[in-house]
Amino acid sequence: MRQLLLMRHAKSSWDDPKVPDHARPLNARGRRAAAAMRGVMAELGLAPDLVLVSSARRTLQTLEALEPWDETPLVEPMDALYLAGAPQMMKLLNAIASTVRSAMVIGHNPGLHELAVMLVGPQAMTPANPMMRSLAEGYPTAALAEFTVAGAWSELGEGGGRLTRFLTPRELPEMSS
């Protein structure tokens, strides 16, 4: 079994309209949310071997907020992940080396949400399941989905992931204040 973690970047700043989208930094709330998610990931033992991260400033800062890891993963910043759609992200996942047990993608919406829904598959998206209902409703900033993947990365496709966890910062006690 393999593990796939999909995380949307934390909340970014719109304070300076002159800053290009790719260069937008995290705002204070985003830094707080990413730090809270780091704590949850540590508690749950979620530590990837490989991190594929968009080259945008806000995704790289989200990654920085998740560090340090107990064991440092291989980190690959990728221009191809910047605002990538689900099909592009799936191609990147399919190219992951077979030796990687746990991979993480830190990216953007709407592509990340589309990828998560694609991995679950239409049959599993049942509103009766609260976790599936939450995922169907959206993919908030700093949200994290954990999937179990049964086969090889190269074979991953629609319906190929089992959603085991979907966490959003607003569910965390540290973010309620």
Image: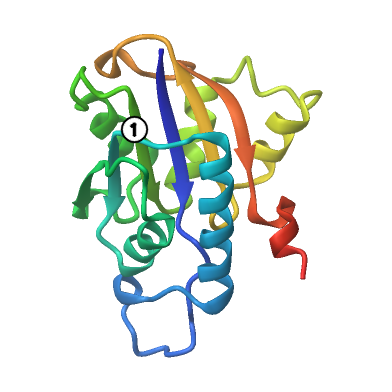
Residue at coordinates 58% horizontally, 62% vertically from top-left? 33
Tell me: 94 left or right of 11. left
| Above or below, comparing residue 30 to residue 13 in the picture | above
Q: Quadrant of residue 173?
A: bottom right
Q: Residue at x 38, y 37 (%)?
A: 86
Q: List x then y, in percent, for residue 109.
A: 47, 52
Quarter of the image that includes the N terminus: top left
Q: Nearer the viewer, residue 69 or 146?
A: 69
Q: Residue furthest top?
A: 151
Residue located at (51% from left, 43% from top): 42
Q: Considering the image in quadrants, where does the C terminus appear?
A: bottom right
Total label count?
1
Residue under the point 54% across and 78% down: 28
Furthest toward the right, the residue is: 128
Residue 166: image quadrant is top right
Q: Position of residue 34 (x, y in %)?
A: 51, 60
Say left or right for 78 vs 17.
Answer: left
Residue 133 location, quadrant: top right
Q: Say which residue label 1 marks.
A: 103
List x then y, in percent, for residue 7.
47, 46
Look at the picture and state if 176 lies above or below 73: below
Report the coloring of the rendering: rainbow
Q: Name the kind of residue labelled 1 in the image.
A: Ala
Q: Residues within 10 Å of mark 1 (few under 14, many from 20)?
A: many
Q: Secondary structure at mark 1?
A: strand
State left or right for residue 1 relative to residue 41. Answer: left
Residue extending furthest toward the front: 70
Residue 132 horizontal/vertical position (percent) = 69, 30
